[in-house]
Amino acid sequence: NGTGTAITGAGTSHDPRTAAGEQAQTLTTRQGHPIYDNQNTRTIGNRGPATLENYQLIEKISHFDRERIPERVVHARGAGAHGVFEAYGTVGTEPIGKYTRAKLFSQKGKQTPVFVRFSSVIHGGHSPETLRDPRGFATKFYTEDGNWDLVGNNLKVFFIRDAMKFPDMVHSLKPDPVTNRQDGGRIFDFMSNTPESLHMLTFLFSPWGIPANYRQMQGSGVNTYKWVNQDGVGTLVKYHWEPQQGVKNLTQPEAEAIQAKNFNHATQDLYEAIAQGNFPRWELRVQLMSDDDHPELDFDPLDDTKLWPEDQFPHLPVGMMTLNRNPENYFAEVEQVAFGTGVLVDGLDFSDDKMLQGRTFSYSDTQRYRVGPNYLQLPINAPKKHVATNQRDGQMTYHVDTAPNQNPHVNYEPSSLNGLTESPRAGADHEPEYRARLMRQKIDRRGDMDFKQAGERWRLHNDTEKQDLINNLTDALSAATPEIQDRMVELFSKCDAEYGQRLRTSLDNVAKDPSAATSRYMGGRVRPAAANGHTN
Ligand code: HEM
């Protein structure tokens, strides 16, 4: 990259391109001019005024003025690390080629470099890492066939199953546009009208909503994808990461104790573990299902608010990921990295999951805005294989992606003047057939499925998890109107009668005696009386 050390490359201490009298460490402007005074502005007399031609000062300050790029609209707070994924060459006990021709999985011991970014979702780039939130778990695999991004969360299900609802869901969880505080009253206003969220809420308000750190949490692709084999046959697939460090979550009081002393504990934990050679590892496991509608199941396999029961669809191991190298520069790597669900390699495909389709539009759209139209030329995002396109120009074009012997005049295709050519097919295309009316309709097989798995999850929680869940729901719901509280109690009662009953009792106790509240984290406020027609 011209002079200097590439941020993602190995550091060099000696730069042969130094001018006479300069050393490699000599400070320069971005134009390469040596700087002999970095302390004093050039002024008329030593008390000023300053002059406008002061290039060095203006370059320094104006670059500083542009140091920030837009934060991610969600998942702004994160930490990342480099590592390697090693394939088992099998899926469970079967040869993996039966289901996917993706080369990264194909042979036992095959290694693929990865970069992972973990994150929390709702608050800004320097918010505490103890907040109740899903945690992002996004992995970029730099495969020989180009990049594959697996953009997942720690929890295996989601709040909603239609991308149409995502901006509303996020708005309800983000701070109130007037008070700038996250508000349980707004959250449960939305959620009480969105019963497919009950399963996710039963995880999120339990200790599963605050993983102890990034190393001791699971990951999941959440949405349903497909694998495609050499014959073009598709199989539905869900991805899961299992931490070899075990799973550890925090109750609300435990999280508050950490937050009082350290709001970066998860970033610190990951960085220090890797720096000390204590490399965290996750096994990648998949669940497979034949590629059809499965009317025999009481849930839709494309509904990301539901789990695929493990007894029917076992988690089959396919490889192991080890994170073994910290980023050299946070901004260049962790901030500018761009993951997207559309980034798949041959042998991996989309399912018809409509959340997944909405996500797939959203990621690269936001990254063209957040990082810029040439975000894929940045070292952290660029594939580690040859890239040759006829796409040109745009803001911050860093280089032109051409083949070494390509005719530089030909930036179009087809051409007979030594331009780029199409590649041969890697296998038979996967060509599903569609026969349906175009419509707007939700997928909910039996109409009551939003309650069943949420109730099962309640019953699977141990006593500590159940009590923490009730306390946290009470806290957040205490900011909601009585009508919204009643609606949530009714919905949780449909999941499990005990669940609803315990929440009712807890809400009533806190209403009678506010000092009975265990926490004032997300709600716990006195609702102001209606003013100016607003009833926030
Ligand atoms: C980040 C949209 C659902 C996981 C983002 C970003 C957007 C977005 C715009 C910011 C990306 C960037 O600036 O680089 C959406 C939409 C969704 C959706 C529209 C639903 C329709 C989900 C789901 C998951 C998820 C279900 C979990 C499986 C993530 C993760 C990140 C992220 C992990 C952070 C990636 C990183 O570390 O850079 N999402 N999202 N999202 N999303 Fe989603």
Image: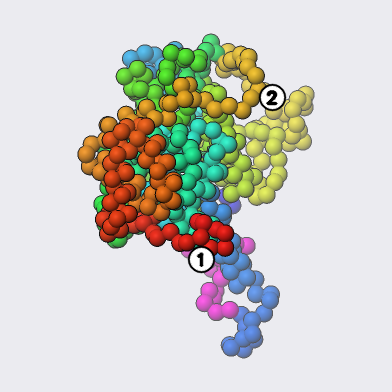
The first of marks 1 and 2 along the sequence is 1
Amino acid under label 1? Thr
Give the percent coordinates (x, y) of residue 511.
32, 54
Q: Is residue 157 left or right of residue 277?
A: right
Asked which colour scheme the image uses, the reply is rainbow
Q: Is residue 38 magenta?
A: yes
Instruction: Indicate which disc residue 421 carries.
Output: 2
Ligand 1 is within 8 Å of the C-beta of the residue at disc 2 = no
Q: Is residue 177 left or right of residue 388?
A: left
428 or 24: nearer the viewer:
428
Please name the residue shown 64% across and 81% down the image: 50
For marks 1 and 2, give the CA distance. 46 Å
Give the percent coordinates (x, y) of residue 151.
47, 36
Q: Secondary structure at mark 2?
A: loop
392 or 128: nearer the viewer:
128
| Magenta residues, start to end | 21-41
Establish if 390 lies above or below 432.
Answer: below
Secondary structure, magenta segment, majority class: loop
Amino acid under label 2? Thr
Residue bearing the label numbered 1 = 26
